[in-house]
Amino acid sequence: MIYAKKKVQNTANLAAQTAKIIANVKELEEKNLIRLEEKEIYLYPDIWKDAATALNWIKCLHLYYMLKKRFKESDPLLFKHMETGELIGSFKNKKAKVI
């Protein structure tokens, strides 16, 4: 869309995206594919197809924790393998990281 000779992007509906994140997390939790604890999330790494998808998941789950568990943006969140407990990702200092 061009407005006043400037290209303007339509922003996505944040409320709809947030609702979708919450619904997806609840569905995964019901299927026992993820387990949410106080500052740790246990999951199967098979959910993450590649590094970009994993980073997106980490950011979405951190947003979920901020909304549902009253997390602060700077609070760390650890992602661990469901069976082995091995660290597979983290969200620290406002940065997502896949290990």
Image (cartoon, rainbow, N blue to C red):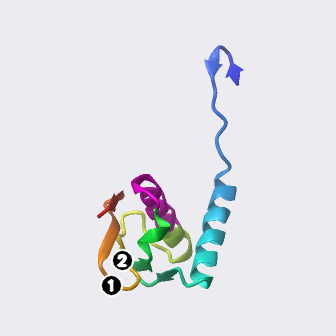
Q: Residue at the spot x=42%, y=63% of the render?
A: 73
Q: In this view of the protein, which residue sits in the foreground, 55 or 47?
A: 47
Q: Would you say residue 72 sits in the magenta stretch?
A: no
Q: In the image shown, does 68 or 60 lie closer to the viewer?
A: 60
Which residue is labeled 1 in the image? 84
Looking at numbered disc 1 in the image, what kind of residue is underneath it? Thr
Q: Nearer the viewer, residue 34 or 92?
A: 34
The circle on residue 80 is: 2
Q: Which residues are magenta?
A: 49-63
Mark 1 to mark 2 CA distance (whole Å) = 8 Å
Residue drawn 64% across and 41% down? 11
Circle 1: element type: loop
- Residue lying farthest to the top in this orientation: 5
Camera-nearest label, 1 or 2: 1
Q: In the shown orientation, is residue 27 left or right of residue 85?
A: right
Q: Could you tell me residue 13's position as x and y percent?
A: 68, 49
Q: Residue at x 45, y 72 (%)?
A: 71
Report the quarter where the N terminus lies.
top right
Answer yes or no: do the residues labelled 1 and 2 have beta carbons within 8 Å? yes
Pick the residue in front: 85 or 8: 85
Could you tell me which quadrant the C terminus lies in?
A: bottom left
Neighbours of disc 2 within 10 Å: few (<14), some (14-19), many (20+): many
SS at circle 2: strand
Q: Does 54 lie within the magenta span? A: yes
Q: Position of residue 63 (x, y in %)?
A: 51, 64
| Prevailing secondary structure of the magenta residues | helix
Q: Residues within 10 Å of mark 1 (few under 14, many from 20)?
A: few
Instruction: Point out residue 15 in the picture as x, y percentages from the top left corner.
Output: 67, 57
Question: At x 55% / y 70%, what residue is drawn?
Answer: 67
Query: At label 2, which amino acid type do we have?
Result: Lys
Q: Is residue 77 above or below residue 6?
A: below
Q: Position of residue 52 (x, y in %)?
A: 43, 52
